[in-house]
Image: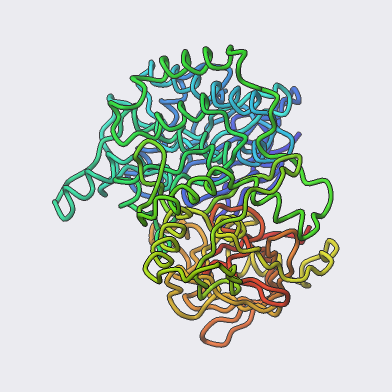
Amino acid sequence: MIAALEPPDDTSPLPVGTVIGGDVVEGVLGSGGFATVYQVRSPGGYVSALKLLPLDQGPERAERAWREVSLGTRLHHPNLVRQLGWGQWPVDEPRYLWVKLERVEGPTLDEWGLAPGRTLGELLDRVLEVARALAVSHEAGVLHRDVKEANILVNEHTGQAVLVDFGVGWHPAYPTLTKGMFPPGTPAYRAPEAWAYGRAHAGEQGAHYRAGVGDDLYAVGVVLYRLLTGRFPFRPAEHGGEDVEAVLHREPLPPHLVNPRVPLAVEEVCLRLLAKTPEARYPDAVVLCRVLEELRARTDVDWKQVPHPERRRPVKPWARRGRVLGVVGVGLAVALGAWWLGSGREVAPGGHTPEPVRAVAAPPAETPPPPAAAPPLAPRKDSAPVKQQQTSGPQPEATSKRRGAAMRNACLGLTGAALQACLGTPQQVPSERPAPPPQECPAGAVKVMTGTLGLSVGERKSVGLTDGPGQGRPVHVQEDATLRVGGHWEAGADHTGKGYKVALPTNTRLFGRLYVKQGRVYGRFTEARTPQGVTYPVCLELLDSSSHVGVELEPGSAPGKMMVSPYAQVRVVDRFP
């Protein structure tokens, strides 16, 4: 028989074999600043997840722990994580509240949905299941307030989406706990009305935005947009945070312009969810469910369409250009129209101004015929010189400039290879070198990262690929790469109520290697050096701002010359794949 062990100090995970609520701890599933989740097994062999929330870190945290338990008792649905039990531990002198939850085995929604081969029908089914979960939750008076792909798991046994983590949920029966302007949540999924409230009440003491049903629905719109296009509706601001001005006043680029495989009927639902006011969205999650069900029943939509097909073999440079031209066919047609008008105005469907964002779109399965040649352009500083065609007569300089401006404005919102194709200039791709084989981390790196620095495998941090502020312009990087950590890299709560431990300070340098593969730059970083000269072995991989592995090549790239965005992320790994 396994004895119930005494609780360890606040900084250590529970040892395997600890008994809580009759279940035996088998290991850690994950941890954050407020709670640790363990895998536990019942005497009958049933495996579940047990979330351990501290009660001795202040009244606000204790109240939030009790609130999470109470909210879980109100929610029962196949698309909501099931709460199996709760209690206090240790029984004699409780220091923790434990919540036992159904263990949902499977990937997060973005990991699942952006994998090659998922059909449009599968993607919409998962979003419909999230809408059903929210309908039940909202009917019970519970707002989730942090709907995002990381909180939606795809159950590998049932194939259905499961909405998890109501840790920042809200119910009118409970008092407001957050003292700041906004409730807890993820800024990239925050609705425009929340940002508008923040601006209107900036500096006002005690001002606090109260989320509503529309906030959860807007977040579903962001989730759907990402599943359709592989990117967020709005690009980050130059300083790396949210572009609030864009969220408040600009329309997101229509998904079918980012990914031509997106049907207009599906796009219509997505854009309505992203409307600027809650009144312009769907009235509630029940109506959203009905709309999605009716949409899914339509026979004029190809539900077997694959929005993100897998690239089967490397594409030759000439074929790559043809595919890029196919991806931006609509944008190129708009560009030609603007050139014909010669007005220099930005052209967009429906009178909306598309936000200048990166076009991340999967190429068509077949290479389309090349479109008509674009009109001549004036050379740009960040692109290869454009060879002008000879004409029979002189062309007025003003007309040439006007046409060039019109083309550039019409291509607004496209970057990288897509922008080059829209402008009629082939994208130069640096010479590829073979991808390195799977590799173990440097000796002791994982222990240093998780022990000495207090980081967790999977944890991410924003970094810069330039010493300066970057100004949002592409930067030239070498294979022997150096990244700069922007802002302190904090490593979770120190469990004393005094905030977070700084794992790596601002301006820590990360050293590693970069390589190019199929139009993206990948990186492995194995050493961190602080401004004080302390060096740590690390194991970090390069991600883009949307948390996809690698970063996209930018205009101006050429053989032997990698141009990339100055902003990226790195992720802690325990092995290089």
Vertical comparison of 50 with 338: above or below:
above
Residue at the far bottom in the pictured view: 533
Q: Is residue 393 left or right of residue 114?
A: left
- Marks counted in the figure total 0
Query: Who's the residue at 81% across and 69% down the image?
Result: 433
Vertical comparison of 525 with 530: above or below:
above
Query: Who's the residue at 70% across and 80% down the image?
Result: 480
Asked where in the image residue 77 lies, by quadrant, the reply is: top right
Residue at the far front in the pictured view: 392
Query: Who's the residue at 53% across and 16% down the image?
Result: 295
Q: Position of residue 115 (x, y in %)?
A: 70, 40
The quadrant in which the C terminus is found is: bottom right
Q: Is residue 330 left or right of residue 114?
A: left
Q: Position of residue 211 (x, y in %)?
A: 30, 34
The quadrant in which the N terminus is found is: top right
Asked where in the image residue 66 lies, by quadrant, the reply is: top left
Vertical comparison of 115 with 553: above or below:
above
Asked whether residue 575 appears in the rendered view, the answer is no
Query: Who's the residue at 62% across and 50% down the image?
Result: 372
Q: Position of residue 172 (x, y in %)?
A: 28, 25
Q: Nearer the viewer, residue 152 or 77?
A: 152
Q: Nearer the viewer, residue 238 or 518?
A: 518
Q: Nearer the viewer, residue 448 or 156?
A: 156
Q: Position of residue 282 (x, y in %)?
A: 36, 22
